[in-house]
Amino acid sequence: MSKHKLIYQIYPTAIGTLRDIADKIPLIAKLDVDYIWLSPIFLSPWVDGGYDVADYRKIDPRFGNMVDFRHLVSVCDKYNIGVLLDLVLNHTSSEHEWFKASEKHDPWYKDYYVWRDKPLNWNSFFGGPAFDYDQIRGKYYLHLYDKTQPDLNFYNPRVVKEFKNIIHFWSSRGVAGFRVDSANILADSAFKPGYLPRIAGFFNYYQTTQTVDILEKLFSNEKIFTVAEPVGGDFMSKAKFRELTRKAFDASFNIGTLDAADTIFSMKDKIQKIHYKHWFKKLAKWTPEKKFSMALETHDTPRAVSRFDTDPKVLAMLEFLLPSYNPCIYQGQELGLKNPELSDNIDDYPGVQSRQMYQRLRKEGKTKAQAMRIVKKSSRDNARQPIDWADYVLQDHNPDSVLNFYRKLIKLWREDIVIAEGALRVRKTTNKGVFDFDRVYKGKYYSVHLDFSCKTPSTLKNDLGQTIITTRPS
Ligand code: NOJ
């Protein structure tokens, strides 16, 4: 069986109900994707776009019901596409019945979450303290994200068992696997008695060995496809995490492909200059072993075309011409979508991250206009807008469209042995955005010239010097 598996991420609210998504599958299938990954569709109060789950076995009514879900799975089946659900393990919503029982000190549930008599001086991902006081329980609880997202206590075997059952529940309903949210931070060191972090800060939160152990218990015996989302850290720590979790996961994202270029992850306030050379070198160092699932965009990042201010076709070439077994396309990326013109009024933003970023910036003394400028550029809401299907159909029919360029590249990535399996040989990297490399396989080689500044066409040539792909329209 081929190791090449292409993942396509869908942020459901940007498409509609599960029936709406099912209707779009025939079009999406033309990209030849192996899996669709649905961002959360479970019952949720929607504080963090569904990443705050109130019931892991119920479909949120905004998307439909279990019958609609089965319909989606059966449509995907017809196109040989597996459905991956988003498994949010690290935390639940505070609306989840486990939390409600834990707050009340219910004997079964009292240790489902991370409770402490005294808070630690940690910050949460979204800004502000990571511990909040719970009036009902009379203790502090940990939340690495929003205060409505209490962290689960994975040192408690009951919590692990709950998720084993949830995984079975979905795999017996035709789910092909999971994208595992915040997979590297499950074992929070806060729970260890007497533990005090030396430096307050996110990266000291997790205990890798324990986390790996938990993940293996959850996933290693399942016949499902799993892709991890490790959060925080740099390429190195993500590479290490990938190594340690080979039993638990088939693939692992390295959103560091974005971080390395100082592209924002959601929490960064400043859009910084891209250090191309530095970024290309990191990519060249980590991609040859195909450790990571290549991803240039997610629902957590602004659109890459806007971020890099480049031709979407150059980005497509980067993603599919570097060695990679499990690349991921974020819905709309294949159309070359840019950031939309977002509102100047923070009240119009659905995302908790945008609002908290705004408040933090204001507290730090930024004017309204300054704060909004930053929010508009770096908000996660940039990538969560409805897809224009009329544009999709136009691009479908236009042989020079970004969409058809992606399709061509995906075919090469799958079928051309030099691109599918060839080794990477870097020739040149410049700070102006030129990245030249070869792909070499058993005496054959192809050369790739990428130019993010678009001063020259980006090209893929075979060893006879014939152009196979170019960003210049024919
Ligand atoms: C990572 C998800 O991608 C992000 O959207 C979410 O806010 C956090 N995890 C919390 O679940």
Image: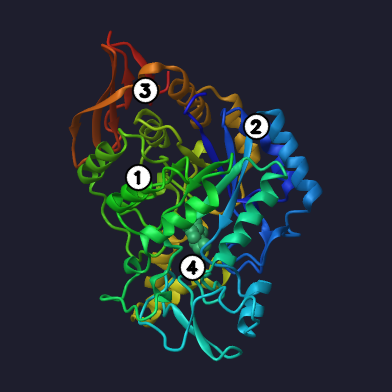
The residue under the point 81% across, 47% down is 67
Q: Nearer the viewer, mark 3 or mark 4?
A: 4
- The residue pinned by badge 4 equals 155
- The residue pinned by badge 3 equals 421
Residue 27, labelled with which disc? 2
* Residue 35 spot, x, y in % from top left: 58, 37
- Compared across the picture, whether 169 is left or right of 338 comes to right
Q: Amino acid at mark 1?
A: Glu
- The residue pinned by badge 1 equals 243
> Could you say which is closer to the camera, residue 298 or residue 78?
78
Q: Amino acid at mark 4?
A: Tyr
Asked whether the viewer can see residue 345, the reply is: no
Q: Residues within 10 Å of mark 2 (few under 14, many from 20)?
A: few
Q: Residues within 10 Å of mark 1 (few under 14, many from 20)?
A: few
Is disc 3 placed on a helix, strand or loop?
helix
> Could you say which is closer to the camera, residue 409 or residue 444?
444
Q: Residue furthest right?
A: 67
Is disc 2 placed on a helix, strand or loop?
helix
